[in-house]
Image (cartoon, rainbow, N blue to C red):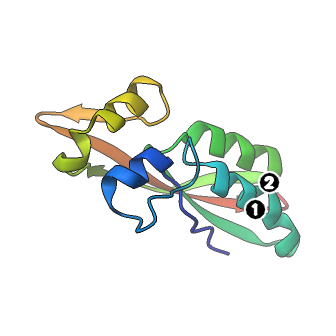
Amino acid sequence: MIGDVSGIPDTLARVSGWFPDGRGGGASGVELPVRLVEKAPGWLSDRGRLLLPSGSLQDEQQLLAAARDTFAHVEKVGERRLPLPQNIAATSEVEQLWRDGVIDLEPRGSRLLWYARAWYCQVAA
């Protein structure tokens, strides 16, 4: 199962223009994904797996804590570093989310980079 639900903070969703209604995954970006993680075992067989996307544009540690509390095995299967578009990176909303520790960015030259990651979450080890 692929757990592809909105996973960025609502304030980032509003300033990015990526979501027409301006809503993402909640205040920290993980409220919706955490609900999916908590319910997923009921939809999967004993050997079932969830492919869980995550990233540093959300409170990724909170999401991973929920996955580790819910699943017997959680393994990172991919990671990619991406530039945050300058028109989004320059907003006060992004600066505040970063300062508050909700999102994690890596300065590289004149750009801010974020990480996209993918995890396999398996019901039984």
Few, some or many C-alpha atoms within 10 Å of disc 1 (few <14, some 14-19, many ≥20)?
many
Q: Residue furthest front?
A: 21
Q: In the picture shown, does residue 73 fall above or below 41?
A: above
- SS of the residue at dot 2? loop
Indicate which disc, 1 or 2, sits on the residue closer to the N terminus: 2
Measuring from the top left, give residue 10's x and y in whole percent.
49, 49
Location of residue 114 (image quadrant)? top left
Residue drawn where x is 35% and y is 37% of the image: 93
Q: Which residue is denoted by mark 2 in the rendering?
A: 71
Q: Is residue 63 visible?
A: yes
Q: Is residue 33 above or below residue 93?
A: below
Q: In what quadrant of the picture does the N terminus appear?
A: bottom right
Circles 1 and 2, Cβ within 8 Å, touching? The answer is yes
- Residue type (three-letter) at the residue carrying disc 1: Gln
Point 54% across, 48% down: residue:
29
For residue 17, the mark is none
